């Protein structure tokens, strides 16, 4: 193993924060000041191919790395993005699953999300509240109001009906619905009538 690769591995194994390549670069630079970000990237790729480390895709915005190559679950904080190890035992046996789905199952990936201890202490800001679980679907105050009003209807509702329920101007409601539709939170099963998608419901919960 080259010295660079060894130091990258050593630095990564010192932490349990599942850092990004950029963060690892900052750590390694303290020991090898002239190393380039590209070299760090390349070595991380090689190390993960060799099974020395793990490449994590738990964060939709950036790849993270784990110095612990053994199989384990992770939990990500939806507020600050922190990723921690999560100790959990699968409750269903793989053998059982094999016969059920017809596949030969070779492995699985179980990911959790939540609010970390630090973020639970601080009251989240509005924008953090509306940042939903899986990705980063942001909706503003008015968008949320429209979504809430719409979720009160049992059948698909028109823009006018939603405006009345939300107590908002119908022009604003229509523009908000457009945005919500583009984010997959609202759908239009009938022309000019709208309802909340499952993702939209999740956003509200
Ligand atoms: Zn957090
Ligand atoms: Zn881990």
Image: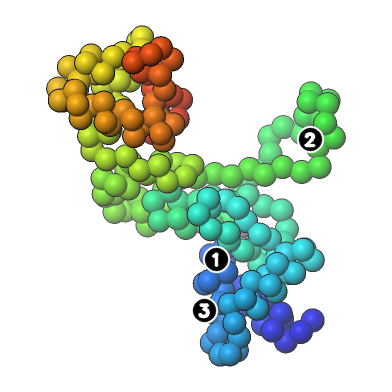
Residue 89 image offset from top left, x and y in percent: 67, 42
Q: Specify whether 185 is left or right of 142.
A: right
Q: Is residue 115 above or below residue 192?
A: below
Q: Residue at x 21, y 16 (%)?
A: 160
> Where the C terminus falls, by quadrant?
top left
Considering only order in the chain, which callout, 3 or 2, is on the residue closer to the N terminus?
A: 3
Q: Is residue 44 visible?
A: yes
Q: Nearer the viewer, mark 2 or mark 3?
A: 3
Q: Name the residue under label 2.
A: 94
Q: Name the residue under label 3.
A: 26
Q: In which quarter of the image is residue 170?
A: top left
Q: Which of marks 2 and 1 is in front?
A: 1
Q: How far apart are the alpha carbons under marks 2 and 1?
A: 32 Å
Circle 2: is it few (<14), some (14-19), or many (20+) Cα within 10 Å? some
Q: Is residue 125 above or below residue 32?
A: above
Considering only order in the chain, which callout, 1 or 2, is on the residue closer to the N terminus?
A: 1
């Amino acid at each position: 193993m080259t010295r660079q690769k060894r130091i990258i591995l050593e630095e990564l194994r010192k932490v349990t924060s599942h850092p990004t390549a950029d963060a690892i670069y900052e750590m390694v630079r303290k020991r090898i000041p002239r190393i380039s970000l590209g070299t760090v990237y390349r070595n991380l790729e090689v190390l993960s191919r060799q099974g020395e480390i793990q490449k994590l895709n738990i964060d939709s915005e950036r790849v993270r790395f784990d110095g612990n190559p053994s199989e384990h679950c992770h939990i990500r904080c939806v507020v600050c993005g922190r990723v921690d190890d999560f100790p959990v035992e699968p409750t269903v046996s793989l053998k059982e699953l094999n016969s059920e789905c017809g596949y030969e199952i070779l492995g699985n990936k179980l990911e959790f999300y939540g609010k970390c201890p630090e973020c639970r202490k601080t009251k989240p800001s509005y924008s953090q509240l509306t940042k939903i679980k899986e990705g980063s679907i942001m909706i503003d105050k008015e968008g949320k109001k429209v979504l809430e009003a719409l979720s009160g209807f049992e059948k698909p509702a028109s823009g006018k009906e939603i405006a009345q329920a939300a107590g908002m101007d119908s022009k604003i409601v229509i523009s908000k619905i457009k945005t919500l539709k583009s984010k997959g939170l609202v759908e239009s099963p009938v022309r000019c009538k709208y309802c909340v998608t499952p993702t939209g419901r999740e956003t509200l919960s």
